[in-house]
Image (cartoon, rainbow, N blue to C red):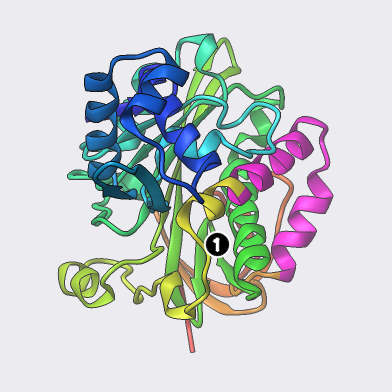
Amino acid sequence: MVYSVNDNPGLIKVLSFLKTHNTEYLSGQDLSDVLKISRVAVWKHIKKIKELGYEVESIQKQGYRLVSNTELLLPWEITEGLETKKIGKEVYYFDSTRSTQDQAMKMSSNIKNDGTVVIAQKQTGGKGRDGRKWVSPEGGIWLSVILRPEFDISVATLFPIASSLALAYAMEKCFKIRPELKWPNDVTLKGKKVAGILVDASLESNKIENIVLGVGINFDIDVKQIEKELKGTPNFYGVTTLKKLKKSVTPVYFVQVFLLELEKIFEMLNSEQIKKITKEWTKRSSTIGKNVELVTREGKITGKALRIDNDGALVISDKKNTRVLAGDIVHLK
């Protein structure tokens, strides 16, 4: 099933009324009268609300009362209280899809979809960098964001790094932790991957038409299941989950915080505040200062990671200072 705010006005009206009157029972007739819909429609909406993970108590001759909220990343939950100016004002939720990135790419050419977010409860064909498999079971946060940047094409390669910084900011604010950033765009906790970034861009006449940012976050996943599927694959270095932190942060709230941090970072890129982004990323980097081995299309490079340049390229001290824009990296002991 696919859900968006605009496609479910009746359900959202019933749910909103239950939320604002959650200390009392509302009869089907009350809801019918106030919302000007039939009692059958009320019953159907209540049934669907329960199916979506909300706990609704029903008592004969008294009515319905909302007991607890859902943990699903439903569009109306994300947009309610969202503080962004543009990102996330339109959200599409899939209970299952092959890839949110594929869905968002199909929508990206329409200028009206600037800032639109596509979220899935699970992905059956999630993608990582370079076409790798991204295991995406229920419990994770799998989303893509469509953006139309104002920044120059030369800055596009910094965007994945900037996005991973926004993700780190969100984790710091919600969980009071200090995640590390592994070049080019992994977010780690104690050396294990907790989130990753993927970017697809559409170019026209040497100008960025749109960017689709794919984000995978191991929010509340079965680590052993993921490790079983990925162990032995190239560049696998372990996974972890945010839920291990045992903080009472809901996935909806975390997504809202991340989208706000992403919008701030995006505005910084648009206003060419590049140095601030690279400085803040470097503060959190687990790569800078380490001896590393990089596998690129041109071959292997081994040396010390010195810094990132304004375009996000990693500068390696080998026989000379080599700049690398893309590649698989291993931190050497």
Residue 59 image position (x, y, % from top left): 27, 49
For badge 1, the amino acid type reads Trp
Q: Nearer the viewer, residue 34 or 89?
A: 34
Q: Nearer the viewer, residue 274 or 105?
A: 105
Secondary structure predominantly adopted by residues drawn in magenta? helix
Element type at marker 1?
Answer: loop
Residue 56 image position (x, y, % from top left): 32, 48
Residue 69 image position (x, y, % from top left): 42, 51
Q: Is residue 168 above or below residue 265?
A: below
Q: Nearer the viewer, residue 18 or 63?
A: 63
Report the side of 118 relative to 227 (left or right).
right
Residue at 49% x, 33% y: name it: 16
Q: Is residue 277 above or below residue 188?
A: above
Q: Is residue 248 above or below residue 147?
A: below
Residue at 53% x, 11% y: name it: 112
State which quadrant residue 20 falls in.
top right
> Can residue 273 be seen in the rendering of this structure?
yes
> Can residue 213 be seen in the rendering of this structure?
no
Report the side of 174 relative to 146 (left or right).
right
Magenta range: 257-283
Residue at 26% x, 71% y: name it: 222
Residue annotated with mark 1: 183
Residue at 66% x, 67% y: name it: 172
Within 10 angstroms of label 1, few (less than 14), some, or many (20 or more) residues? many
State which quadrant residue 178 falls in.
bottom right
Report the side of 251 relative to 314 (left or right).
left
Tell me how many marks there are: 1
| Magenta stretch: includes residue 263 | yes
